[in-house]
């Protein structure tokens, strides 16, 4: 075994960090010593560095990383190249010629890290050529996917046990952010880990506040608007349960003057990537997504994560909500759920044919239902769910332990806000109302609180103008290089630049996240940007369009576009566009066009509505031909509703 290297020197050289986070150093040493490893570390704990650092130090061999998403691989490789660590990836996004080049370079030991998808790794031909690669160790990222007890089980992950058969002498390291005791044991058994060293971090995230509110369909939109407007700084994530709800919510927010981008798995890859990057680079502060969003997202200053429905499991909720507050600052995780969410989860569980999987789904259902309805400390529930046994009984950081948010507590008017009203979400540099009162919740009598229970005081403010100027520079450099903005400069580094305002390269080197390569690459340019700001230059506000989704749709209709063309232009599903057009018809903004729904289908819908009423869509859907869509039904019902309004007698007063 090679002599132990100076890990702290390598940490400063590549990443520009002065110290390790909890458990990182032990994990790095364990991998360097060639031992199997199992790591469970919450989102934001710095898992990737744990295997990237020992890989970077081995100049002769390559660490092979199994990662589930192409976009995640691309980002990791780009970030490594920025700090001077050679890395490659092999997946279906590459042309065959490029794949052959990567394989050739891998055989020659040119990469310190090589990223593969599980689907690619389990191919027989992959094992053949990988046998010619000087492999140091294997990393299984998102390792909970290997377990049938996990919340994101993927059959192809189960076959990764073949690694031990084909590469018996190579160490294997499993990494995950959320795994119960049962899942951890299953991971180690399935991968055949030999006497692995286990690193299990605490699941307690003290800077996060968990708040749960049961509401109805009329209250939820107003609560969401209130919540988003209450955070004058940082980024925000809204999780919606379906693709349709994602698109509707993004359009609803845009119609209220809150710019938001949607993100879901059925978008084409380019649109999904563009929306994510707009959010990551702070062009848009709000992202509305399904659970498809978030894996590997390296965004530090997320001030709130708001769920609009019960997640599928407590593991899902912990992972999704945990994308808030990765910078350690106070952040809120708010769950706005409705009784009908339980019915939807029940419906999907009943569709499962495998009885063992159905049983596991019912267990996850019970866990998330108990979490939503329980009167117990929410941090405590989460810790116990993952097998942790805290000594404290009150976190002082959840609604069950006395935390209140004014926007959640104030009564809600049941009327839905006007879709045409335009209200701007406060931008960080604009004059913003004071943030909600920050106070630590008073512990209940006899309650034991965790050591260092949070007071939730915000960190000192930096100069917003300088932050925006650096953001603009970062965005321009990222566009020039064709990489995401966070690859150029992490949010935490950007904030540290604003705080330190370095005047020399040596001082730039002292900024968080600036190692040798990054300082050499961008140091002089950053000093120039800071000097420009000092002499009065400011970021030019980007031209913003006032065109709401409704306005854009009306314009496209006036141009003679079909509903299918509008869906394609707006990157929306057809049923989402149909629903929006139906609302425009109901509001009298546009006349119903007979071309939207075939005459015979229209007659069938109208006849069913006459018999069954138009209050609910499902009875009508069940009464008409199976190929008639909900979107068509909505359009016809909107036409009927508008006709009733126009024919209603007007008052003489």
Image (cartoon, rainbow, N blue to C red):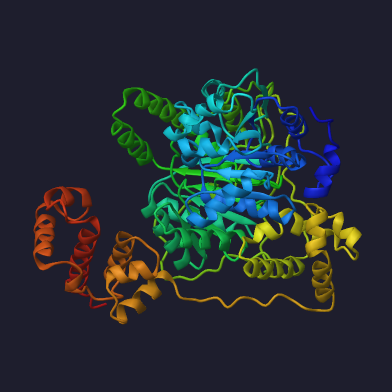
Residue 339 shown left or right of residue 108 in the figure? left
Q: Position of residue 275 (x, y in %)?
A: 51, 61
Q: Quadrant of the N terminus?
A: top right
- Residues 454 and 103: in front is 103
Residue 249 shown left or right of residue 227 in the figure? left
Q: Residue at x 56, y 42 (%)?
A: 321
Q: Position of residue 605 (x, y in %)?
A: 13, 59
- Residues 187 and 643: in front is 187
Q: Quadrant of residue 543?
A: bottom right
Residue 19 shown left or right of residue 345 in the figure? right
User: In the displayed structure, would residue 597 be above or below residue 490?
Assistant: below
User: In the displayed structure, would residue 85 be above or below residue 366?
Assistant: below
Confirm whether residue 298 shows in the render.
no
User: In the displayed structure, would residue 53 be above or below residue 75?
Assistant: above
Q: Residue at x 78, y 63 (%)?
A: 521
Confirm whether residue 554 shows in the render.
yes
Q: Quadrant of residue 491?
A: bottom right
Q: How many tags in the picture?
A: 0
Q: Residue at x 55, y 33 (%)?
A: 143
In the picture as drawn, the residue positioned furthest to the bottom comes out as: 559
Residue 323 shown left or right of residue 53 in the figure? left
Q: Quadrant of the C terminus?
A: bottom left
Q: Quadrant of residue 203?
A: top right
Q: Position of residue 499 (x, y in %)?
A: 82, 59
- Residues 447 and 151: in front is 151
Q: Position of residue 48 (x, y in %)?
A: 67, 41
């Amino acid at each position: 075994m090679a002599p132990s290297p100076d890990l702290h020197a390598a940490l400063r050289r590549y990443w520009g960090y002065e110290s390790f986070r909890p458990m990182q150093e032990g994990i790095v040493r364990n991998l360097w010593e060639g031992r199997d490893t199992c790591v469970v570390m919450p989102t934001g704990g710095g898992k990737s560095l744990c295997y990237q650092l020992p890989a970077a130090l081995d100049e002769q061999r390559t660490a092979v990383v199994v990662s589930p998403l192409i976009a995640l691989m691309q980002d990791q490789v780009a970030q490594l190249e920025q700090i001077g660590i050679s890395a490659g990836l092999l997946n279906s996004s590459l042309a065959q010629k490029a794949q052959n080049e990567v394989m050739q370079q891998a055989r020659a030991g040119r990469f310190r890290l090589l990223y593969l998808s599980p689907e690619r790794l389990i191919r027989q031909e992959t094992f053949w050529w990988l046998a010619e690669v000087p492999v140091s160790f294997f990393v299984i990222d998102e390792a909970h996917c290997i377990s049938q007890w996990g919340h994101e089980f993927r059959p192809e992950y189960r076959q990764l046990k073949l690694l031990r058969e084909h590469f018996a002498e190579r160490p294997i390291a499993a990494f995950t952010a959320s795994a119960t005791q049962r899942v951890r044991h299953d991971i180690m058994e399935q991968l055949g880990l030999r006497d692995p060293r286990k690193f299990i971090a605490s699941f307690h995230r003290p800077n996060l506040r968990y708040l749960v509110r049961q509401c109805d369909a009329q209250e939820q939109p107003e609560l969401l608007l209130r919540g988003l407007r209450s955070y004058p700084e940082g980024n925000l994530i809204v999780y919606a349960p379906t693709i349709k709800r994602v698109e509707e919510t993004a359009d609803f927010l845009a119609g209220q003057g809150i710019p938001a981008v949607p993100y879901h798995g059925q978008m084409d890859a380019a649109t999904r990537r563009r929306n994510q990057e707009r959010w990551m680079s702070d062009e848009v502060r709000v992202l509305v997504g399904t659970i498809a969003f978030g894996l590997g997202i390296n965004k530090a200053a997320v001030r709130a994560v708001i769920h609009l429905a019960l997640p599928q499991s407590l593991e899902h909720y912990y992972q999704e909500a945990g994308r808030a507050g990765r910078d350690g600052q106070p952040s809120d995780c708010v769950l706005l759920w409705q009784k009908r969410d339980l019915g939807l989860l029940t419906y999907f569980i009943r569709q499962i044919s495998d009885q063992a999987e159905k049983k596991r789904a019912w267990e996850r259902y019970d866990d998330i239902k108990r979490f939503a309805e329980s009167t117990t400390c929410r941090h405590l529930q989460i810790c116990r769910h993952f097998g942790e046994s805290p000594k404290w009984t009150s976190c002082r950081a959840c609604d069950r332990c006395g935390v209140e948010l004014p926007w959640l507590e104030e009564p809600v008017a049941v009327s839905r806000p006007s879709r045409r009203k335009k209200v701007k979400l406060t931008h960080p540099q604009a004059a913003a109302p004071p943030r909600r009162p920050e106070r630590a919740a008073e512990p209940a009598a006899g309650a034991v609180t965790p050591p260092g229970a949070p007071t939730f005081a915000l960190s000192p403010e930096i100069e917003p103008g300088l932050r925006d100027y650096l953001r603009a520079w970062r965005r321009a450099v990222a566009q020039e290089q064709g990489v995401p903005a966070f690859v150029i400069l992490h949010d935490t580094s950007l904030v540290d630049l604003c705080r330190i305002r370095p005047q020399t390269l040596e001082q730039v080197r002292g900024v968080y996240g600036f190692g040798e390569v990054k300082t050499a690459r961008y140091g002089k340019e950053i000093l120039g940007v800071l000097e420009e700001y000092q002499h009065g230059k400011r970021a030019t506000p980007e031209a913003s369009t006032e065109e709401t989704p409704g306005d854009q749709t009306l314009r496209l209709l006036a141009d003679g576009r079909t509903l299918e063309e509008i869906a394609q232009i707006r990157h929306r599903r057809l049923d989402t566009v149909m629903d929006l057009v139906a609302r425009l018809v109901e509001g009298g903004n546009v006349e119903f066009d007979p071309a939207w729904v075939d005459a015979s289908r229209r007659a069938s819908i109208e006849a069913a509505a006459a018999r069954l009423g138009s209050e609910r869509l499902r009875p009508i859907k069940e009464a008409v031909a199976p190929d008639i869509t909900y979107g068509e039904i909505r359009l016809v019902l909107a036409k009927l509703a508008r006709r009733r309004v126009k024919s209603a007698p007007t008052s003489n007063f």
